[in-house]
Image: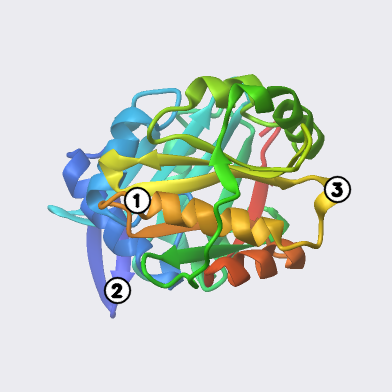
Amino acid sequence: MPIEVHKGGNSLRVTIETPRSIRGLSVFLAEMNNKPAHHIGYCGEQMEEIIDTLQNDFSDVEWSQSFKVAYEEDRIVGALGFDLDIEDRSAEVWGPFVPEVDLRLAETLWKSLYETVEDQLDHFHFFYSGENELLKRFIETKSGIEKGKHVVLVAQKGEQPSYVTGEIVSYEVSCWEAFKTLHEEAFPKTYYDAETICNRLNEQNQLLILKADDQRIKGYVYIEDDLAHGEGSIEYIAVSNAFRKQGIGTRLLQEALLRLFTFERIDEISLCVNATNSVAINLYKTAGFNVKDDLIHSLIMLEGK
């Protein structure tokens, strides 16, 4: 699809196509996503990470059919991707990535990609930096609505306060009932139930427990390590109501970071928290996290269009 775009008083010929190569697309996405003015929370910031996501964990259809790319001859000047969930009729939107504030190019990319999925999808989620002015304006043109604000916090290896504790131990079968009860109370509707977590445990995926004197547990934290990409994550943390305001959450987080950072390839841990959850944000800061990004979640609904 050839179109004319204007830049600095010049008219440029651009074609809209499926990606010519996964590497070329990933290089462009990584370059753009490292800039706050273009940052999308769903998209990674490293080329190899993006390639792996596209090949192994992206969309319900082939990754190449989930993107449209704008080329000026051999150079990428824009890209848009839909991470489709067909059962839910939704997509997490990567982009539009357009180097300059060019709403016409953004709209052309959208129209070209949307036409390929309009019978499968009707709502689209965006997760983007507050500095991404193009996306704010683009979402406004589609009558999108803001659903909430979030804070991304990051902990770097070697920056955690020192502490000593021997009370936090790896999960034992004797803790099953207490752990299951606390997990169900803290996360009644979640992606991993208690049984799933226990079935996933191995050297990399660890469930850490702070036990009380009796059969109860004061709290737990569940962590996962993705050594292939040098990433670690804190998936769940919960403290029993009977033991709140004792610094247990901070101790669990510190132990989680200590365990994760023992893996040589893991240098950074990030997590996302609702911006209104000041208690959680302060907890993470106390444990050694620092604020990296402020992100906005918006939604476009296109039923009947």
Whether residue 21 appears in this view of the structure is yes
- In three-dimensional space, the C-alpha distance between marks 1 and 3, rounded to whole angstroms, equals 47 Å
Tell me the tag on residue 7.
2
Please, which colouring scheme is shown?
rainbow
| Circle nearer the viewer, 1 or 3 | 3
Q: Residue furthest front?
A: 213
Q: Is residue 5 left or right of residue 12?
A: right
Q: Is residue 281 left or right of residue 11?
A: right
- In three-dimensional space, the C-alpha distance between marks 2 and 1, rounded to whole angstroms, equals 17 Å
- Name the image quarter holding the N terminus: top left
Q: How far across and down, in percent of the image, does residue 270 sit?
A: 48, 57
If you read the primary sequence from the N terminus, does the residue marked by circle 2 or circle 1 appear first?
Answer: 2
Pointer 3: what residue? Answer: 241
Tell me if mark 2 has few (under 14), some (14-19) or many (20+) residues whose alpha carbon lies within 10 angstroms of its own. few
Q: How far across and down, in percent of the image, does residue 44 sit?
A: 37, 52
Whether residue 77 appears in this view of the structure is no
Q: Is residue 24 left or right of residue 144?
A: left
Q: How far across and down, in percent of the image, does residue 152 sit?
A: 55, 63
Pointer 1: what residue? Answer: 79
Q: Is residue 211 above or below residue 73?
A: above
Q: In this view of the protein, which residue sits in the foreground, 58 or 277?
A: 277
If you read the primary sequence from the N terminus, does the residue marked by circle 2 or circle 3 appear first?
Answer: 2
